[in-house]
Image (tube, coloured by chain):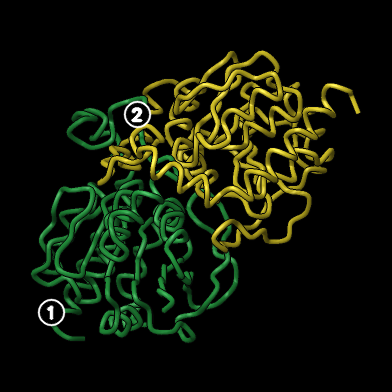
Chain colours: A green, B yellow
């Protein structure tokens, strides 16, 4: 039986949020990967890379796993009813409901994380609370059939957890060897604690505008969820 | 001054070889990234993802950094004179000559690694010797202005070494924090030593056909280099 995986792609997605898990998922036994957007025109990711969706929200079959990546372009999705309805509809039939990076905020905005533990990019993690989710500062968080990854590169660690749950540890390890995933970062600044307060403050300052827009979108989405409008 | 980076893309590229460094490179200050192929039609990566080149071999300006990723589709590049001539031409003017995964074999086939230390995916690493290069079992190998990364995910470690050399450690660390690169693989099978002989043998067996074709292409390219034909 083919395992159907769907990854949402959208304008200004962080392409590595998608590309990391994609490489792992593509090596699953008997898998079909759907890159889903509203239409089939090329989308432009953050940084400028152009990728092609291969199915639409309207035509996507029931998935076994749905994954929502993140990126600046995730902000408008928080109040995009077509996208949120699609995820909710899929969520009823999937084995695994998943996200990478700020994609967990979209799951939250769809009302799917109430009372659930979830990961997110460190800079936006606390925003999960607005949706009744419990933010967790881990690379990968598993809560029932909900598996969420932290920021960007955490998507690779996330994908191996998914691989093991869906196909067993042996399959996960074979893929790890194939993509030589034995990381050795040359520097040690990969999370706020390691990077230190000065670099964290600078990074927050640079992202202030996007984060303010995100907070506004989160507030609006949370109000919609609460009031059922 | 804009820093021009060119990444070769080609049919059946391993998309994560490209996507890892791309995410890091895209965050360099004042950078322009060229995704280069013979024409601008969408290319299909390993796994099926379709991406769009944004420039052609004929139209690409002189780069500051050229990077050749790897993947099954790299095999035909080893004897593709149009591609090899392009890389050789660019190599004369770049600040950094680079590759990820089996892309180093293409640099070798272009005659650019003679006497140089280089990384490669573990399964194809020894093939570098055919081009007079010195295979090194590291994630990232720096030899003068030649920086090469090991298999697939090593491209991320590689990109941070490049970031530090081109723009300094502070820039590299800021990007590391932004993409939360504090990897925590859930399993420990990311290189042949850790994976153990049984999994290594199985992985080699599954890739035997592609590796035999690669060896034949390497032999042909090495003969061409030696005999100047």
Which of the chains bears the disc numbered 1? A
Q: Position of residue A207 (x, y in %)?
A: 32, 45
Q: Which residue is disc 2 drawn over?
A: B173
Give the alpha-carbon distance from disc 2 to disc 1, as whole Å: 40 Å
Image-based side of A132 in relation to A69, left or right: left
Residue B148 x %, y %: 55, 27
The quarter of the displayed image where residue A82 is located: bottom left
At x 76%, y 23%, the residue is B111
Q: Is residue A18 left or right of residue B60?
A: left
- Residue at figure coordinates x 50%, y 56% from the top left: A45
Q: Is residue A213 visible?
A: no
Judging from the image, what secondary structure is the residue with disc 2 in?
A: helix
Q: Quadrant of residue B144?
A: top right
Write down the residue under mark 1.
A226
- Name the quadrant of the C terminus of chain B: top right
Considering depth in this image, is B110 or B41 the residue closer to the camera? B110
Corner quadrant of residue B177: top left
Chain containing the residue with disc 2: B
């Amino acid at each position: 039986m083919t395992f159907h995986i769907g990854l949402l792609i959208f304008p200004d997605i962080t392409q590595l949020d998608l590309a990391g898990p994609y490489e792992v998922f593509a090596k699953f036994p008997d898998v079909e990967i759907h890159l889903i957007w509203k239409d089939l025109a090329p989308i432009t990711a953050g940084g400028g890379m152009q990728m092609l969706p291969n199915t639409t929200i309207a035509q996507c079959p029931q998935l076994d796993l749905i994954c929502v990546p993140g990126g600046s372009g995730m902000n408008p999705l928080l109040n995009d009813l077509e996208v949120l309805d699609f995820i909710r509809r899929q969520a009823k039939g999937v084995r695994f409901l998943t996200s990478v990076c700020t994609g967990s905020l979209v799951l939250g905005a769809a009302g799917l994380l109430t009372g659930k533990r979830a990961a997110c990019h460190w800079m936006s993690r606390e925003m999960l609370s607005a949706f009744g989710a419990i933010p967790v500062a881990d690379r990968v968080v598993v809560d029932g059939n909900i598996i969420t990854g932290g920021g960007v590169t955490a998507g690779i660690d996330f994908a191996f957890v998914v691989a093991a749950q869906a196909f067993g540890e042996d399959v996960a390890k074979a893929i790890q060897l194939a993509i030589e995933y034995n990381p050795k970062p040359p520097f040690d600044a990969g999370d706020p604690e390691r990077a230190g307060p000065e670099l964290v403050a600078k990074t927050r300052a640079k992202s202030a505008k996007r984060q303010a827009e995100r907070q506004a979108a989160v507030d609006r989405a949370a109000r919609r969820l609460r009031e059922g409008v």
